[in-house]
Image (cartoon, rainbow, N blue to C red):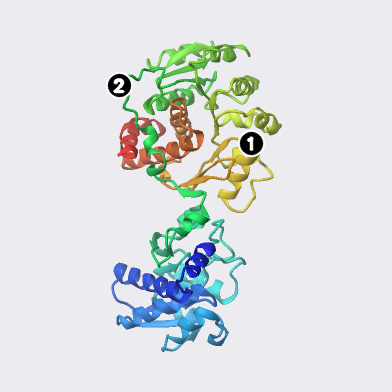
Amino acid sequence: MAVADAAAVAAGTPVSTLMEAAGGAVAAAVQERYPRQPVVVLCGPGNNGGDGFVAARHLDAAGWPVRLALLGSRGSLKGDAAEAARLWTRPVEELSVDLLESHPLVIDALFGAGLRRPVDGIAARLLARMGVLGLSVVAVDVPSGLHGDTGEVLGQSVKADLTVTFFRAKPGHYSLEGLRLCGEIRIANIGIPPAVLDDIQPALWKNEPMLWSPLLKRHDLGDHKYLRGHLTILGGGYSTGAARMAALAARRAGAGLVTIAAPATAAAIYRGTEPGNLVADCDGDDDFARLLADRRRNAVLIGPGSGGNERTRRAVLSALALGRAAVLDADALTVFAERPDTLFAAITGPVLMTPHAGEFRQLFPDLADIPGKVDRTRAAAKRSGAIVLLKGPDTVIAAPDGRAVINVHASSALATAGSGDVLAGIAAGLMAQGLAPLAVGAAAAWVHGECSYRFGGPGLIAEDLIHCLPEALGAAMN
């Protein structure tokens, strides 16, 4: 955003014009959302505070009762923020928690996305008091204290009903803390020309079907099951439901055939359930490699219920040695916790890894505490050579070259056993059809989330997601 602002100024749009547009957009959003009522505008010492001065002036002109308080002195303001303050002809008050006791609507223009230090002092006390009183808050750019890049809370922040940001959203808006704090996010056009993105060349996207949906549409009448891909899943001797659900999800996602490679002791369980799932006996260390010798078996899924054992480890290395497109989940990741470099060195083809936070920490212990989920996931993808899908309400899918996608299209109902197995199955089903791993991760995450919305109520379990897959895929392709 700093580069975008500078490019707009270089192209002839003064900062004062951008600030006027930003503050006007905040005032317009307030008037659209709320009935006229007393407003307190809390302004910081930078350009975020300048936006607040502009918003206050617009609301005052529209007849709203407005009080404005400033962190610091009016005389210490500089540049365009000082000019915005000069145009505000009403009183400027000192920050005080007493401003909040009448339960006004609050416009939080204290600190923007560029904050680099923890919020403290009177500003922190004000933000905390807003939460205690349950006030309605409109945040300018970000709720104060939320880091725009990493999405971490610096010291103290506040939950907003509405966040008005400018030109493009920031990574922090779609972090876990951002999702908790930002409320409704509105992105206002303030006059920055979209052409500035040509020079910036952003490599981070919010996940939407427009990024990958054309890849899902197959209309060739000459298609047959082998053209749709033959997925092989390593089944375990216990927890057989994980591989079975993944297989059903993969078939619903479009894989032409799905075979579960099962131990002989459990093969009867796999064969006695879903009739469309093929089952092959797989006990010895070489059995899985022999199955994959058939080149029509173009994709593998290893991890769901496979077991944290040597059989799983050898199966992963066999699949990677043969260059098969692979989705590695759960046990297929944790079996390499002691020697992750062994796994990374074997990755030469298309691979998608789908860890949750605990599995990520086992594979990448020194990366797990990097501030910002996007940066953590990018670093892991670069190190491993795989596409990494780090699960959560703010799922991040990152490629070794730095491209990344944030998926927030998901409901909290997905926090149920087996949900991750279904996600892995969807991803593997798409991988079998030849999609590139970054597109696979983005599409699978979005469709998985759409299934949770399609269910439409409480009581969701993992099996329900599979039944919702046809509608979810249809929504993605329309």
- Label 1 SS: helix
The residue lying at 45 percent from left, 68 percent from top is 140
- Image side of residue 112 versus residue 344, left or right: left
Q: Position of residue 67 (x, y in %)?
A: 41, 83
Q: Is residue 171 visible?
A: no
Q: Is residue 404 above or below residue 131?
A: above
Q: Is residue 446 above or below residue 27?
A: above
Q: Is residue 282 above or below residue 59?
A: above
Instruction: State which quarter of the image contains the C terminus.
Output: top left
- Label 2 SS: loop
Given residues 296 and 245, the one toward you in this image is 296
Q: Position of residue 186 (x, y in %)?
A: 38, 61
Q: Position of residue 423 (x, y in %)?
A: 45, 34
Q: Residues within 10 Å of mark 2 (few under 14, many from 20)?
A: few
Given residues 306 and 199, the one toward you in this image is 199
Q: Mark 2 belongs to which amino acid?
A: Leu
On the image, numbered disc 2 is attached to which residue?
Answer: 221
Q: For the residues marked 2 and 1, what is the alpha-carbon distance in whole angstroms?
A: 39 Å
Say which of marks 2 and 1 sits in front: 2
Among the two numbered marks 2 and 1 on one chain, the one whose residue lies closer to the N terminus: 2
Q: Residue furthest front?
A: 11
The residue lying at 64 percent from left, 20 percent from top is 314
Residues at discs 2 and 1 in contact (Cβ within 8 Å): no
On the image, numbered disc 1 is attached to which residue?
Answer: 384
Q: Residues within 10 Å of mark 1 (few under 14, many from 20)?
A: many
Q: Identify the disc placed on residue 254.
A: none
The residue lying at 47 percent from left, 53 percent from top is 174
Q: Position of residue 103 (x, y in %)?
A: 39, 75
